[in-house]
Amino acid sequence: MNRRRRVRVPASSANLGPGYDVFAAALSLSLELEVSETGEFSVESDTPGIPLDRTNMCVRAFERLHPADGLAFRIRSEIPPSGGLGSSAAAIVAGLVAADSLYELDAPLLEHAIAIEGHPDNVSAALLGGFVLCADDRPLRIDPPAGLEGVVVTPPEPVPTAEARAALPKEIPVTDAVHNIAHASLLAVGLARGDLGLVSRGLSDRLHQNRRAHLYPRSMEIIGHAVEVGALGGTISGAGPSALLWCNWEHTGDVVDALHEKAPDCVVQRVRFDLSGADVEDIR
């Protein structure tokens, strides 16, 4: 019998305000990869511009563990590329999980994912779900607090990650570093305790968002209105341009309605913080 696997991997939002290259969260938008033994290599995708050969990120990650000869890859994704929502991390995790399950390899998936991506935050959230705090490539996972939801707002202009990283200086003032340490600590404690008041206080950043504001001025304008429209606060998702507005579930609908009015040029999506992470199904 020809083997088939279907893997679902969540999107992810990195940095979460003060936690640059350390914090990330899994979101309920997802990438789905189906791999089937057909005797012939092929790649299909519903995302325009995605490579349909062995340079495809899902295939590259898969082939880190096993050759893709004779396999058909079918990719469906709700995650916009170059949107700051972990599209590459989801593809990496999907390929690794599919290969590991299809051939029963018991591989160290997170180690491989970090090696491919180059940093641990997005891939850790995509693989493990929930919130992750990454130190020394060893993520600490925290379950999403009850009642916490998000709204993702994606402006039409993408921001290449390389440009976003190049915009940051090699050194920052001590006062900015102290501010981020303090607020990252508040955010971590708020998430661990389920205290949405502390979460709201912990979202402030002085390290990366303002220094990259010229790359996503629309996104900065949106997070500047976060509290005004009823959210707990707002953060730039990863390298941008997507903005993540953090909400008490009771107010999320009102926030979505307000953002449709204030940002008609953007895609506005209500999201949950994903609990489960990557999931694989054996298709018979």
Image (cartoon, grey):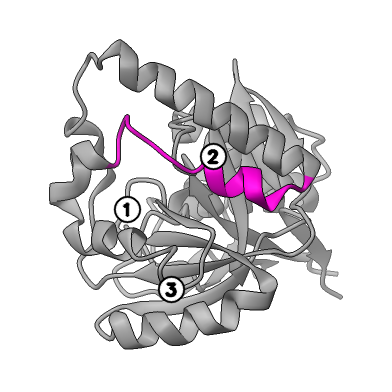
Q: Residue at point 46% right, 68% down?
A: 152
Residue 271: percent from the left, percent from the top? 59, 71
Q: Closer to the observer: label 1 or label 2?
A: 2
How busy is the neighbourhood of tag 1: few (under 14 within 10 Å), some, or many (20 plus)? many
Q: Say which residue label 3 marks.
A: 229
Q: Which residues are magenta?
A: 194-209
Q: Amino acid at mark 3?
A: Val
For the N terminus, the quadrant is: bottom right
Q: Is residue 65 visible?
A: no
Disc 1 is placed on an element classified as loop
Looking at the picture, tell me which residue is in the foreground, 126 or 190.
Answer: 190
How far apart marks 1 and 2 lie (CA) works out to: 19 Å
| Residue 134: quadrant of the picture | top right
Q: Closer to the observer: label 3 or label 1?
A: 3
Please report whichever mark, 2 or 3, sits nearer to the chain's N-terminal start.
Answer: 2
| Residue 40: quadrant of the picture | bottom right
The verdict on residue 202 being magenta is yes
How far apart marks 2 and 3 lie (CA) works out to: 18 Å
Q: Say which residue label 1 marks.
A: 240
Q: Is residue 42 left or right of residue 171?
A: right
Q: Amino acid at mark 2?
A: Gly
Disc 2 is placed on an element classified as loop
How busy is the neighbourhood of tag 2: few (under 14 within 10 Å), some, or many (20 plus)? many
How busy is the neighbourhood of tag 3: few (under 14 within 10 Å), some, or many (20 plus)? many
Q: Say which residue label 2 marks.
A: 202
Q: Is residue 104 left or right of residue 178?
A: right
For the C terminus, the quadrant is: bottom right
Q: Is residue 62 left or right of residue 158?
A: right
Q: Residue at point 82% right, 72% down?
A: 283
Disc 3 is placed on an element classified as loop
The reply to whether callout 2 and callout 3 are in contact (CB within 8 Å) is no
Q: Is residue 174 left or right of residue 247?
A: left
